[in-house]
Image: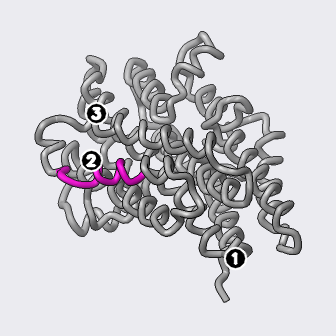
Amino acid sequence: MLSRIAENLYWIGRYVERAENTARLLDVNYHALVEAPIVVGARGLVTEQWAPLLSITGDEQAFRAHYERADNRTVPEWLAFHPGNPASIRSSLSRARENARTLRDRISLEMWEALNRAYLQLCFDTDQILEQDRLHEYCVAVRETSHLFFGIAHATLLRDLGWYFLEAGQYLERADNLLRLLQIRYRRRIEHEPTAQGLENHRGMALLKSVSAYEAFRKKYHTALEPRRIAAFLLLDEHFPRSMRYSVAELHRTLRSIARLNPGTSLQPVREAGWLSAQLEYMTDVGQIIEQEAPGIAELLKSLAHISDVISATYFAYA
């Protein structure tokens, strides 16, 4: 498979997953503000949760070039619709669609139609969505687009190199997004911010819902939403498909498949992903992660970035 084809499929996986993650994050934050508990200062603290979303997506500096303050209007506009934000939902879907357009002979017709339809429906005429309080409906449509696209891919693509590069992009993006989310949500705990119990539970519920994990967590645990237990579930659970451990294990699996179908290429991507997967598999205490001790969240993010760089250097180097 040509390097450019492999790279385009890999980035389609990343872009579509990124759009879904951003949509879920915006939707949960929107409802967290509406449903904030009646606790002294709670509404103000929840309102402040809009600004950290910029750190999760890694584009706070660019945001400040366009807006003076981060609030419930400017942050959703930037993360969902702004053409100047390369990581916005609109930009992610547009780039995924453009990559798919160049691969019409490599993907199924249904996959192309799903992305093209999403592009036409979700990337234009967005000016009135916030004005008309339709952010929730928009985010639901984005999530459903992602589920539909990956579902169609799962049902129609040959299990060849193209499929595995698409999967690799999806799982790497998923793991990266989860770590950025945890990095922000647990920063205040590290700084010993006093928090009322009602607000603590509210934040725990919002965190789980941000990765569609609330029902799965409740099914496994019937106790209070204790922050350390939530972190352990999201980082180390081997059965939840959006956990860090599960995502990295799947990334390792896809890279092994790519190496098997691509004999003669470097095995460094497989080794790097395998090493990170083994670290997570045999880790028993999340305290060292959320308290920023080695291998804290920042180090795990660096490991993922390194794996991404190694994948690019190994498979996407053009002559």
Neighbourhood count class around disc 1 (C-alpha, 10 Å): few under 14, some 14–19, many 20 upward: few
Residue located 18% across and 60% down the image: 68
> Residue 121, position in %: x, y?
28, 47
Q: Tell me the quarter of the image containing the N terminus.
A: bottom right
Residue located 42% across and 31% down the image: 194
Real-space Cα separation, disc 1 to disc 2, in angstroms? 34 Å
Residue located 66% across and 75% down the image: 3
Q: Amino acid at mark 1?
A: Ala
What secondary structure is found at the residue carrying circle 3? Answer: helix
Circles 1 and 3, Cβ within 8 Å, touching? The answer is: no
Q: Amino acid at mark 2?
A: Pro
Real-space Cα separation, disc 1 to disc 3, in angstroms? 39 Å
Residue bearing mark 3? 136
Residue located 47% across and 32% down the image: 207
Q: Which residues are magenta?
A: 115-126
> Residue 271, position in %: x, y?
84, 61
Residue bearing mark 2? 76
Residue bearing mark 1? 313
From the image, state whether disc 3 or disc 2 is nearer to you.
Answer: 3
> Residue 280, position in %: x, y?
76, 43
What secondary structure is found at the residue carrying circle 2? Answer: helix
